[in-house]
Amino acid sequence: MRTLAIETVGLVRHFDQTRAVDGVDLAVEPGIVYGLLGPNGAGKTTIVRILATLLRPSAGRAAVLDHDVVSEAAEVRRRISLTGQFASLDEDLTGAENLVMFGQLLGMRKGDARARTRELLADFELVEAAEQRVGTYSGGMRRRLDLAASLLGRPSVVFLDEPTTGLDPGKREEVWRMIRSISQAGGTVLLTTQYMEEADALADEISVIDQGRVIAHGTPPELKRAVGGQTIVVRPQDPGRITEAATIIEQVVGHAPAAASHEVLTAPVAGDGEFGALVRQLELAGIESAELSLRLPSLDEVFFTLTGHHANNGAHTDDETRTDDGSPTDGPGHSAQADTSRPPGAETAA
Ligand SMILES: Nc1ncnc2c1ncn2[C@@H]1O[C@H](COP(=O)(O)OP(=O)(O)OP(=O)(O)O)[C@@H](O)[C@H]1O
Ligand SMILES: [Mg+2]
């Protein structure tokens, strides 16, 4: 049988009365980004701490690359890294000095630590900032330096516990690119997040965690399909033609669309065929669209359907507030035209 990067079977951890982790089974293939998605207090950090050998399970077992996290903790530690582990970046040292120092703490010779530092500074786009003191770094730069530090020892499995919490959307995407590059280089990433878009953008596979249990598992498209249905989104270029567009949608899909706003119509559809027909009918009527797309439900909608609550209702960053009118555009689906009305980070509005 192939070695799994991470395996847990019936994992349980309680703190007094709280069952923080309540029977979790995970099977993570090597080389992927695996997302643990769940709200505040779901048990994500507790799972990560057990896997990183910082906390013992109350019951069940967990292994990293076939090494048991309790009986072979040293073997596990040799193969992993955990962001936050190096949270104590030295503010008075430069980025490069910090990395060299961490390399030496890991037992690397100074020359090797320097060579590895140069590679990582390039990978994490920190070459220009390399000689600046970390005290002058922005939040995004620190996060990148943190990630770089966690890769010094070339770990096979990288645990990232909410790696972009508190970053603004532009910075978050920088960090996402770096995270993707870890798995592209062959590493396995276990990522925890409360953010739907983050799981959607990064994770090859997701376990949705709520109250210490896995309540759903699959690839992002699988999770979306499991909840069912796709939605057509139409935004006429000329808002004055929205009534005509609504009539056409009704003719094609057999029921009246919902108005997501004064400018946008949405309608659930059975399949791609109806989308094609709608594109043709709108064209025939001469109605140009600012947005014309077919999307799966967003992961937020999926989570809401599964749990009855939104995943990040405990998060405080404003940029995470999502509208409930079905407007998030993070679903894939094919867009006939890009939605230019929604610049990155515009989800804040509404
Ligand atoms: N050391 C501890 N002592 C007591 N209770 C704890 C401890 N660590 C976690 N818990 C509790 O276990 C539950 C799960 O916490 P955990 O930190 O794993 O959640 P999380 O999914 O990481 O949440 P967040 O998104 O807020 O980081 C919570 O109810 C929490 O209060
Ligand atoms: Mg946590």
Image (spheres, rainbow, N blue to C red):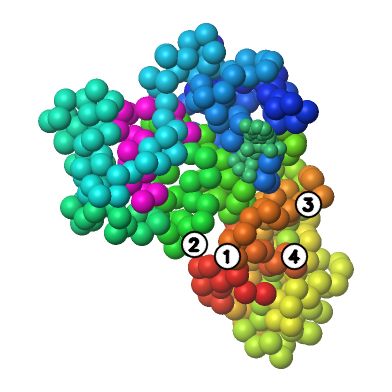
The answer to which of marks 1 and 3 sits earlier in the sequence is 3
The location of residue 75, given as percent across then percent down, is 42, 14
Q: Nearer the viewer, residue 253 or 134?
A: 134
Q: Which quadrant is home to the N terminus? A: top right
Q: CA distance from mark 4 to mark 2?
A: 20 Å
Q: Are marks 1 and 3 in contact (CB under 8 Å)?
A: no
Q: Look at the image and tell me whether residue 220 can be seen.
A: no
Looking at the image, which residue is at 78% across and 52% down? 309
Q: Tell me, yes or no, whether the highlighted magenta stretch contains residue 232.
A: no
Residues drawn in magenta:
142-159
Secondary structure state at the residue bearing disc 1: helix
* In the depicted structure, whether residue 137 falls above or below residue 253: above
Q: CA distance from mark 3 to mark 4?
A: 11 Å
Q: Are marks 4 and 1 in contact (CB under 8 Å)?
A: no
Looking at the image, which residue is at 38% across and 31% down? 186
Q: Nearer the viewer, residue 69 or 219?
A: 69
Secondary structure state at the residue bearing disc 4: loop
Q: Amino acid at mark 1?
A: Asp
The answer to which of marks 4 and 2 sits earlier in the sequence is 2
Reading the image, the residue beneath label 1 is 319
Reading the image, the residue beneath label 2 is 169
Q: CA distance from mark 4 to mark 1?
A: 14 Å
Mark number, residue 324: 4
Mark number, residue 309: 3
Q: Are marks 1 and 2 in contact (CB under 8 Å)?
A: yes
Image quadrant where residue 14 sits: top right
